[in-house]
Image: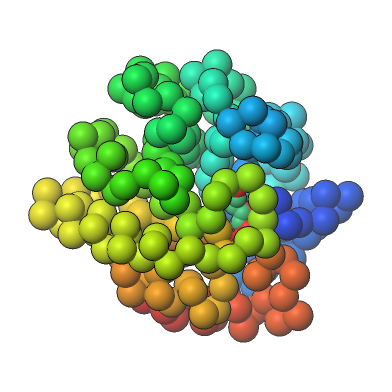
Amino acid sequence: MTKIAASILSADFADLAADCQRLLNQGTDLLHFDVMDGHFVPNISFGAPVLECLHKALPEVFYDVHLMISDPVKYAPDFAKAGANLITFHLEAVPDAVPETIAAIRAAGCQVGISIKPGTPAEAVYPYLDDLDLVLVMSVEPGFGGQKFMPSALDKLSALRAERDRRSLHTLLEVDGGVNTETGPQCAAAGADWLVTGSALFKAKDPAAVIDTLHGSH
Ligand code: DX5
Ligand code: ZN
């Protein structure tokens, strides 16, 4: 079944744990933690201390940490210590240091993902597929929630799915940005295993219905 990763960027930060628990009760599978440094992307979100508090409040949850930062090697250990299960970094942030970055995240004790922005082709991650737990395809320019889904992500998901199957790998495919009850099923059909949803879930009048639709979409 397709899994739903709730992007807490759209949560009520004044009541973060309760807002996350509300969606977990409805069937959200994991929490997606968007870290922005105001350098790799033109926005600042939150860092490891917030994850540490959330992890203390909700220790059983799987924490899918999406680092939209320029120096993932420097900060990955902080997020690992704070409770991250999987840490994804951007290929565009460290194009010449991908193996070292993967190794640093593994050494910190976490699963590893690579993310690509809309302008980066799927083939750019092929050399690293064997060493990854997950590939995150951005379907918006990273930096802000609530943007419109870019359909070019669908072709990338299909290409990655075909390449993964051709090589008999188990690398998970995740998609992030503008995922809702209309675009989510398209992503699942194209090959996504995990759907990140922020605004479409946190702001939904009936989140259970959104979750049912997205779960049933594969
Ligand atoms: C964008 C973030 C996303 C975003 C998703 O840079 O990586 O996780 O918050 O939010 P929605 O679902 O609102 O596009
Ligand atoms: Zn994200």
Residue closest to the eye, 141 or 55: 141
- Residue for point 65% across, 70% down: 200
- Residue for point 83% across, 49% down: 13
In the rendering, at what x and y percent does residue 79 appear? 60, 28
- Residue for point 64% across, 79% down: 208
Q: Quadrant of residue 198?
A: bottom right
Q: Quadrant of residue 71?
A: top right
Q: How many marks?
A: 0
In the rendering, at what x and y percent does residue 157 appear? 32, 60
Examine the rendered structure and indicate whether residue 97 appears above or below residue 132. Answer: above
Residue closest to the eye, 15 or 200: 200
Whether residue 182 is visible to the viewer of this picture, yes or no, is yes
State the quadrant of the N terminus: bottom left
Examine the rendered structure and indicate whether residue 152 appears above or below residue 40. Answer: below
- Residue for point 51% across, 80% down: 182
- Is 152 positioned to the left or the right of 160 in the image? right
In the rendering, at what x and y percent does residue 12 appear? 82, 56
> Can you name the residue that lies furthest to the right here?
14
Whether residue 59 is visible to the viewer of this picture, yes or no, is no
The colour scheme used to paint the residues is: rainbow
Q: Quadrant of residue 126?
A: top left
State the quadrant of the C terminus: bottom left
Q: Quarter for ligand 1?
A: bottom right
> Can you name the residue that lies furthest to the front here?
119
Examine the rendered structure and indicate whether residue 207 appears above or below residue 123. Answer: below
In the rendering, at what x and y percent does residue 23 appear? 68, 66
